[in-house]
Image (cartoon, helix red, strand yellow):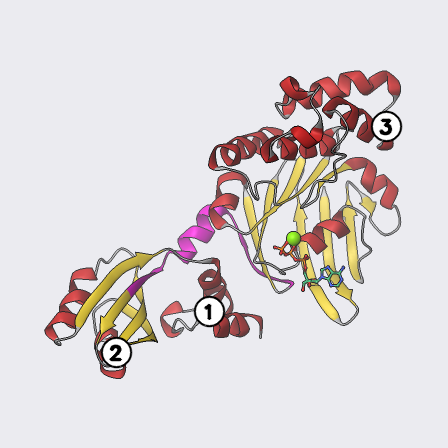
Amino acid sequence: MIDVQGLTKRYGRTTAVEDLHFSVRKGEILGFLGPNGAGKTTTMRVLTGFLPPTLGKVTVAGYDVMAEPLEVKRRTGYLPETPPLYTDMRVDEMLAFAGRIKGVSRRELRQRIAETAEKTAIGDSLHKIVGHLSKGYRQRVGLAVALIHNPDVLVLDEPTAGLDPKQIIETRRLVKSLAGDHTIILSTHILPEAAHTCGRVMIINAGKLVAEDTPENLTARLQGFETMRLVIEGPEALARERLARVAGVGGVSAMPEGDGRVEFSVQMQKGRDSRKELARAVVESGWGLLELRPVGLSLEEIFLKLTTTEDPAEAEVAAPESSREAATA
Ligand SMILES: Nc1ncnc2c1ncn2[C@@H]1O[C@H](COP(=O)(O)OP(=O)(O)OP(=O)(O)O)[C@@H](O)[C@H]1O
Ligand SMILES: [Mg+2]
């Protein structure tokens, strides 16, 4: 349904997306995961025919986005990062307006509004003024606008950003219920978000594809190691050396906090709880142990793991700034 071959997009001298290849099958939900500036929005704007690619071939529902952007737009629904809504219109007026623009005939309009309102669960708000709605409802109206012409393909740019946990769950459920009838590509910053909704996830960083797999496989790949955070009162170099000798430790990095305190990030083999051994190593060396806790994998660490070395044991956890550079180099 969507086919992207060698997509490169440059803005002047900035390369936002470089040589992306992927395709999305009919009825599938593909997650597009990446940090700020990774190129998610850029890719989505190209897919929806709003932005011409610099290089490469992109087809949506069989139409080339360069040659036939109108055909592409007819078959795609796009929810931009900030849904473009007229805040002084009523919801039903907004949907009617969007429907007319997207070529829904007057005859079908009423039916389309009813169906779309039901799908997005805004039936109770059709007569409300868009500007009076909560953020979550506005997001649903944005989705309804994207769906009004019953497109084959839905392109959703961070559909859950800024929503409360309850609305996030509702939006996920809604998006899932739309798959099958529609082919969906959605972007997010957050791995669990993609894992909940998507059948397949692509991770992009600095415009390049760094991994593509099912959420289960990605999570398994990423969970080979986990990170412990320790704050120690003691000598940095000696403590680093001692921690590195604890069984199950893959890498150690240190960040002095001042006052003789040092924060350590310790990469642990997963499934091996070495907290006791870490604590013993510190205390028996006569240093103060001020903190010891596991920290979740950040996206930053995921990129580090995926982009620097095959074996995370060899990759010392660097400070976030330098790891970003390492990942993008
Ligand atoms: N209109 C533009 N002109 C110049 N540079 C742009 C433009 N739009 C995006 N960029 C640059 O392209 C890169 C990718 O931006 P893009 O908005 O696609 O990222 P993103 O993955 O959507 O990020 P975010 O998570 O912050 O939404 C960034 O370096 C950005 O500064
Ligand atoms: Mg974006």
Q: Position of residue 171 (x, y in %)?
A: 56, 33
**Disc 2 secondary structure class:** loop
Badge number at residue 320: 1
Q: Earlier in the sequence, mark 2 or mark 3?
A: 3
Tag shown at residue 100: 3
Left or right of 283: which side holds 173? Answer: right
The residue pinned by badge 2 equals 260
Residue 218 sits inside the magenta stretch: yes
Segment tinted magenta in the rendering: 207-229
Q: Is residue 41 above or below residue 208?
A: above
- The nearer-to-camera label among 2 and 1 is 2
- The local secondary structure at tag 1 comes to helix
The amino acid sitting under disc 2 is Gly
Structural distance between the alpha carbons of marks 1 and 3:
48 Å
Secondary structure, mark 3, is: helix
Picture layout, residue 124 above or below residue 239 = above
Can see residue 181?
Answer: no
Residue 232 shows in the view = yes
Distance (Cα) linking label 2 and label 1: 22 Å
Q: Say whether disc 1 or disc 3 marks the residue closer to the N-terminus.
A: 3
* Residue type, numbered disc 1: Pro
Q: Quadrant of ligand 1?
A: bottom right
Residue 71 is situated, as x and y percent measured from the top left of the image, at 86, 40
Q: How busy is the neighbourhood of tag 2: few (under 14 within 10 Å), some, or many (20 plus)?
A: few
Where residue 163 sits: x, y (%)? Answer: 54, 39
Q: Is residue 146 left or right of residue 302?
A: right
Mark 3 is surrounded, within 10 Å at the Cα level, by few (under 14), some (14 to 19) or many (20 or more) other residues, namely some
Name the residue at 21% across, 78% down.
Answer: 234
Measured Cα–Cα span from mark 2 to mark 3: 67 Å
> Which is more N-terminal, label 1 or label 2?
2
